[in-house]
Structures are given as structure tokens and as C-alpha cells.
Image (cartoon, rainbow, N blue to C red):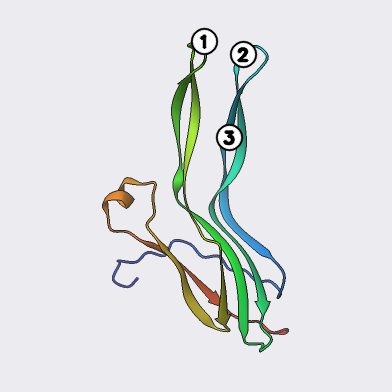
């Protein structure tokens, strides 16, 4: 980071008890068309749903029998670029052109399990981001790291 070739994008700090699932979200809401159907008058009906865009991390830690390792199940999801809305069209059976919005999402998602000793940091994932022109032409990679600390009662 000191040379300017690495950029810190986001951090999520999650504290939970052994065996208790926890989720952290640093996201905004985005709506997108998820279904297209025709009503009784043969008019298009668009169903929209809300989606969270940003960083979401779900995890469940279990402290090992030795008291110094953590078995961790986790599922981080990170959107590498804002949603991109564009217009598409189809032609129905009567030859009418139906135009509707579609939304592209650019995500990196990982579901994994890992065992970590107390106080360690590990690289979980390395991926090429998508969704922006500079991502396509430049040699850019993004990484997810995790640090695990066991906090004892009263610490």
C-alpha cells in the first residue's frame, strides 16, 4: 500500500459467539426486474425485487476443543462495480416490441470453510473484478483476507 500499487477497498468487523451465525452488511438497496409475464389484457407485467449491493459477509465460527483454533464457515460477497441498468426488448407473439430494463450485477462470491489459529490472517480469495472498463484493460486483482482473534470474556 505504501508504494500506491495496492488499494484498501473495504473492511468488515464481526464479533460473535462460538456456534452463532452472524452477518455484516455494508450495502445499498437496488431494484431489478426479475420476472416478465402478461396480464389478462395481454400487457406486460414486470416483477421487481430488491437486492443488496456492496459487501456482505455471513459467518459461523466454532472454537476448537484446543481453545486456540477456530473452525469458520463463511460466505463473503462483494460487488466489484455498481449495478448497470440497460434496456432490452423482445417481440411478443403478436409482433409487438416490448422494451424493459435489465440490471447487470458484478459480484465476487465465495463460500468456504477454514480452520484458523487465534491471531492469524489468511488470504481467502483472489479474483479479477468486472463491471468497469479499467478492470477489463488493466492488470487488476482483488483479494479477500480474514483475520481471526478469539476474545475471552472480560477482554
Please provide percent x and percent y for residue 40.
Answer: 68, 14
Q: Is residue 11 left or right of residue 49?
A: left
Instruction: Assign a secondary structure to mark 1.
Output: loop
Q: Identify the residue at image location x=51%, y=72%.
A: 146
Q: Which dot, 1 or 2, sits closer to the camera? A: 1
Please provide percent x and percent y for residue 121.
Answer: 49, 78
> How many angstroms separate mark 1 from mark 3 (CA)?
23 Å
Above or below, 74 relative to 51:
below
The answer to whether the residue labelled 2 contacts the one labelled 3, judged by CB atoms less than 8 Å apart, is no
Q: Residues within 10 Å of mark 2 (few under 14, many from 20)?
A: few
Q: Splitting the image into 4 quarters, where does residue 30 fall?
A: top right
> How many angstroms separate mark 2 from mark 3 (CA)?
19 Å
Above or below, 32 relative to 2:
above
Above or below, 94 relative to 140:
above
Residue behind mark 3: 34
Q: Identify the residue at image location x=72%, y=72%.
A: 19
Please provide percent x and percent y for residue 6.
Answer: 34, 66
Q: Identify the residue at image location x=56%, y=52%.
A: 27
Q: Is residue 152 left or right of residue 114?
A: right
Residue behind mark 2: 42
Mark earlier in primary sequence (2, 3): 3
Instruction: Assign a secondary structure to mark 2.
Output: loop
Q: Along the line of sight, which residue is nearer the eye, 93 or 125?
A: 93
Residue behind mark 1: 94
The answer to whether the residue labelled 1 contacts the one labelled 2, judged by CB atoms less than 8 Å apart, is yes
Furthest residue to the front? 93
Q: Splitting the image into 4 quarters, where does residue 36 fall?
A: top right
Amino acid at each position: 500500500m505504501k508504494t500506491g500499487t495496492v488499494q484498501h477497498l473495504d473492511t468488515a468487523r464481526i464479533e460473535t459467539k462460538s456456534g452463532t451465525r452472524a452477518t455484516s452488511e455494508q450495502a445499498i438497496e437496488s431494484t431489478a426486474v426479475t420476472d416478465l409475464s402478461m396480464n389478462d389484457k395481454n400487457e406486460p407485467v414486470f416483477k421487481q425485487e430488491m437486492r443488496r449491493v456492496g459487501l456482505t459477509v455471513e459467518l459461523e465460527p466454532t472454537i476448537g476443543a484446543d481453545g486456540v483454533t477456530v473452525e469458520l464457515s463463511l460466505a463473503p460477497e462483494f460487488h466489484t462495480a455498481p449495478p448497470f441498468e440497460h434496456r432490452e426488448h423482445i417481440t411478443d407473439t403478436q409482433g409487438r416490441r416490448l422494451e424493459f430494463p435489465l440490471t447487470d450485477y458484478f459480484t465476487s462470491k465465495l463460500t468456504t470453510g477454514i480452520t484458523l489459529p487465534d491471531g492469524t490472517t489468511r488470504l481467502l480469495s483472489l479474483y479479477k473484478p468486472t463491471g468497469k472498463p479499467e478492470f477489463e484493460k488493466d492488470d487488476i486483482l482483488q483479494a479477500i483476507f480474514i483475520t481471526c482473534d478469539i476474545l475471552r470474556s472480560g477482554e
